[in-house]
Structures are given as structure tokens and as C-alpha cells.
Image (spheres, grey):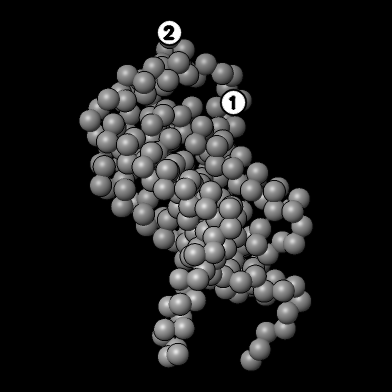
Amino acid sequence: MPLHQRIRQSLIDRFMTFEPIGLITFAAVAGGVLAFLALTGEVIEGDTHAFDEEILLSLRQTADLALPIAPSWVTHAMGDITALGGVTVLSLMTVLSVVYLFLARQRAIAIFMALSIIGGWLVSSALKLGVARPRPDIVPHLVEVHDLSFPSGHAMLSAVTYLTLAALLSRAEQYRATRIFLMAAGIFLTLIIGLSRLYLGVHYPTDVLGGWCAGAVWAAGCWLVARRFIAREPKGAVPVG
């Protein structure tokens, strides 16, 4: 059989032999795409404005909308947390993780992870430009922002980066407890970063929901591809060449 036919048959065989976890993840990705499209449609039509406004106003003092309902130390903490979803921190995390995987002799996963995260960032930018939703003006912003609003870049990029890092780094770990910790850490960071954007008044709740949804779908899709097509190199493997 010619080489191209063997490669095609190998790909078909892989898709036809999904494990239950693979099927569940595929279904979740498909459902997430539909949910994001539905939410985007509602946002464009303006049907979510009342919900968004109510949530943002509930986080501020009625007498002065410039003041959050929580003590000042919470506002300071939220500013620190939101920085974890900024491009600088996410870029550093990505570079360090890629270097770690190269040192761990997991070159294929390292390259795929870098490409996955870069691709997710490009998709986030494209979605923002496509929807072109202005930033909320319901309450004063507690940090400076300049770009568009939907989906939340911090929410989506943190989901893309931290969830993808967790999912692909876990492929280099042999212990289940370590893999679970990595995924839990990725989910936790994604959630608190998204919530910080609401607290600071720079995003509508639906912006954050859209960012979480799109980012999680991207990360899950990347994990699914890696699971099917990228073999984990054994610990201590000696590279050839």
C-alpha cells in the first residue's frame, strides 16, 4: 500500500477508535461551540444587556458606583489576579512550560502546545474584531482598558493558556494525582481571572462567559488532538541525532 494511503488509513483508524473520554470531550467541544454561537447571537442582538447591567451594578455601592462593595484590599487583590491573565504573564508561563517540556524530552508536545496557544490568541483577537462590542460604561473602570469587549480577552486567553498548559503538561506526568492537580490549578486560575474582570468593571458578565466558553472549547479541542495524534515520549528517552 502506498505511503499516503497508509497515512490516511492510520488517521481514519484513530478517529474510529475513540475511547469514552475522547467521545465525551468531543461532545463537550461540539456543545461548547453551539453554546458560544448562541451567546454571541444574544449579545449582538442586545438581549443580555439587562442581565449584564444588574450584575455589574450589584458589585458597586449604590451611593457611589466608583466604589466596589468589598474592602479596598479586595480591589488590590483583584488587580493582582487580573494581571495573571495579561499577555506578559501568559507569555512567560507559555515559554517556561515549553522549555520544561523540551528538557523533559517531550518535544512533540512542547511544539504542539506553543502552536495551540498562539492559535488560541489569534482566534481571540479575531472574535473581538468580529463582534466589535464596546466596553461597558455602566460603572467606572478600576483599571485602564482600550480594546473591545466580547469575548473577554483575559477570560479566553487565560482559559486557552492555563487549560492548554495543564492538559498538555499532564501528558508528561505519569502520576494521576499530578495530572488532576494541574487541571484543577488551570481551571481555578481561569475562573478567578475572569471574575476579576467583572469586579473591576471592565467587562460584562456575558463577555467573561463567552471568553470562558471559547477558551475551554479551544483547550479541549487541542487536548483531544494531542491525545489522538501525539505520543508521549517515555521518561528518560535518549534523543536520536
Label 1 and label 2: CA atoms lie apart by 19 Å
Picture quadrant of residue 192: top right
* Image location of residue 69, percent across then percent down: 52, 16
**Would you say residue 2 is visible in this rendering?**
yes
Q: Quadrant of the N terminus?
A: bottom left
Q: Which residue is mark 2?
A: 63
Label 2: which secondary element? loop
Residue furthest top in the image: 63
Q: Residue at x 38, y 31 (%)?
A: 206
Sequence-wise first label, 1 or 2: 2
Question: Are there few (<14), some (14-19), or many (20+) residues within 10 Å of tag 2?
Answer: few
Q: Dot 1, crowdedness within 10 Å: few (<14), some or many (≥20)?
A: some
Residue 12 in the image: above or below residue 31: below
Q: Are marks 1 and 2 in contact (CB under 8 Å)?
A: no
Q: Residue at x 76, y 76 (%)?
A: 236
75 or 182: nearer the viewer: 182
In this image, 194 relative to 102: left or right?
A: left
Instruction: Identify the residue position indicated by label 1 in the image.
Output: 74
Q: Is residue 114 above or below residue 89?
A: below
Residue shown at 48%/46% (left/top)? 28
State the residue in front, 16 or 24. Answer: 16
In the picture, the quarter occupied by the C terminus is bottom right
Q: Quadrant of residue 64?
A: top left
- Residue at horizontal 56%, vertical 18%? 70
Residue 16 location in percent, x, y?
49, 64
Q: Amino acid at mark 2?
A: Ala
The amino acid type of the residue labelled 1 equals Val
Q: Which mark is residue 192?
A: none
**65 over 109 or under it: above or below:** above
Asked whether, in this view, residue 43 is left or right of residue 8, the answer is left
Total of numbered circles in the picture?
2
